Image: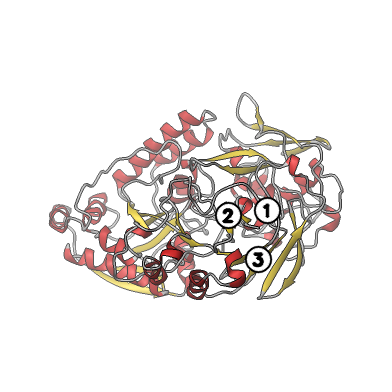
Amino acid sequence: MTRTTTRRRSVGAVSAVAALALVLTACGANEQDHSATGSTGAVQQGGTLHILTSAPSINWDPATSQNLAITTLGLVERRLTAWQTNPDGSTDVVPDLATDTGTVSDDGKTWTYTLKDGVTFEDGTPITSQDVKYSVERSFAPELSGGLSYHKSLLTGGDDYAGPYDGKQLDSIETPDDKTIVFHLDSAYGDWPWIVSMPAFGAVPEDKDDVSTYTTSPVATGPYTVAETQEGTSVTLERNEAWDQATDEARTAGPDSIVFELGQDESVVAQRLIADAGEDQNAFGASFVPAAQLAQVQNDPGAKERLVTSGPGALAYLAINTEAEGLDDAAVRQAIQYAVDKQAFQVASGGAIAGDLATTLITPGIPGREEYDLYPAEPSGDPDKAKRLLADAGWKDRTLRLVVPDDAPTLAKAQAIEQGLKRAGLTVKIVSQPSDVWTQTVTQGDGSKYDLTLSSWQPDFPSANGNIQPLFASSQIGDGGYNLSRYSNADVDALIEQATQETDPDAAAGIWAQADKAILEDAPVVPLIYTKNSFLHGSKVQNFEIPDFPAYPNYLKVSLAQ
């Protein structure tokens, strides 16, 4: 699935789940049991898979893409590491272009990779370590902004580097020979093997790099090449004859060809897949099934068998601007924790099938997550307790501006939040803005234009690092960062730094869990629901798997019945 937000992705800004004032239950949907996630079985070779997406285009440039490792870009372009989704729902980092997931130095600051034998570009030219270095370097170029960029602040010298187009190299990436690439970091970083699974850590041949065309005409390293692009209509992938299955444990490459049908209306896509006629039997929808069609599917046994609902994925939350008047008092923010009607928000999101009620910041499916509830209340909240806490805090009533994107599903959710806060005596004004304006309001400037906002976040890799650091590190306030609550706590920053530098996964998980609870004690956000994503596929689609993380189908494993 192609992401269409800033480098710190906010799923809430682009969520396609329509909100209706009805309750849908998950019975009947294929709840995630990891053994029946869409006709799972042996991979059959052949046929044309159709992927129906609302996206108007596909960005194949690894420097600017935010694509997950198991979705669109991974069909065409490999990275140093990849993600392996397993039958039990877990996701592991595995070698891709590299022979292993990295060898780390004793101080945790240097990571070394060796490229596999037999990995080539689509014309058969062997991939070298210099091609990987160049791919990473070009992601620093101002001309190629917008991609996932965790590495830019981690690599030594990255803060001052502006890409290779002026002839300069990044000295912290070394290529002692054609097979070896070494990364030098400013500090230890235990999650580095996940970082090198991101798009920039693929391979781009310098002599084929054209900033103006690479978005639509990449040089393939994966099982498919981009054969044809009809602007705004479709993109067709065909087999890459130079790809060797023996070198690739992440991809099965079942279909002979894959056609992305672009610019599709999500409701129409759902209706087509419910009907399951003709080529739609060989198709799946890349977008979440809208709530209206979710209700329809419950009464259609044939479609119900082809509806796959993920486990809890992203965290939907209410961000409280901790710099705003009155909201800089933690006691007031704690009162808001009790005032919010999470159940009403869940209903507005589509009901129980849309997500489970949330109490923590680290989402289910992420290693090290600990279950707890600092603000126990009925699902509809505890307005009386909220009123008492507000009175004790000396709250002086003023209108709180709840700023949200102006799409109908988000407005319905905002109304659910407004109604809950009103019961506790809080006055809320919903301010709706076009999505791009909303993003500017909450991620740029001094934060003076909003008090509350709604968002949703799925980490970019399965580590609590991806839950905590982008949303709560003080370095992520403003300048495009997604610390929407503008939360700053030196002790939490220290925990984030400590956990980030810990190379023992179990030890790191314990520190992240400590940070999770420390943040919520300050109440900068209200966890609302852990969202679930529902997808429909045609009757001939096989191996349509959704792991615990990420809550999206693994495009790299899908095949067709022959």
Please name the residue shown 46% across and 67% down the image.
16
User: Which quarter of the rendered picture does the N terminus lie within?
Assistant: bottom right
Please name the residue shown 53% across and 62% down the image.
537
x then y, percent, for residue 322: 34, 55
538 left or right, relative to 492? right
Q: Which residue is mark 1?
A: 254
Q: Which residue is mark 3?
A: 58
351 left or right, relative to 503? left
Identify the secondary structure beneath mark 3: loop
Mark 1 and mark 2 lie on one chain; the one further toward the N terminus is 1
x then y, percent, for residue 15: 46, 65
Q: Nearer the viewer, residue 342 or 190?
A: 342
x then y, percent, for residue 452: 34, 63
Q: Nearer the viewer, residue 476 or 363?
A: 363
Please name the residue shown 66% across and 47% down the image.
251
Q: How many marks?
A: 3
Q: Which residue is mark 2?
A: 542
Mark 1 belongs to which amino acid?
A: Gly
Q: Nearer the viewer, residue 417 or 276?
A: 276
x then y, percent, for residue 502: 52, 31
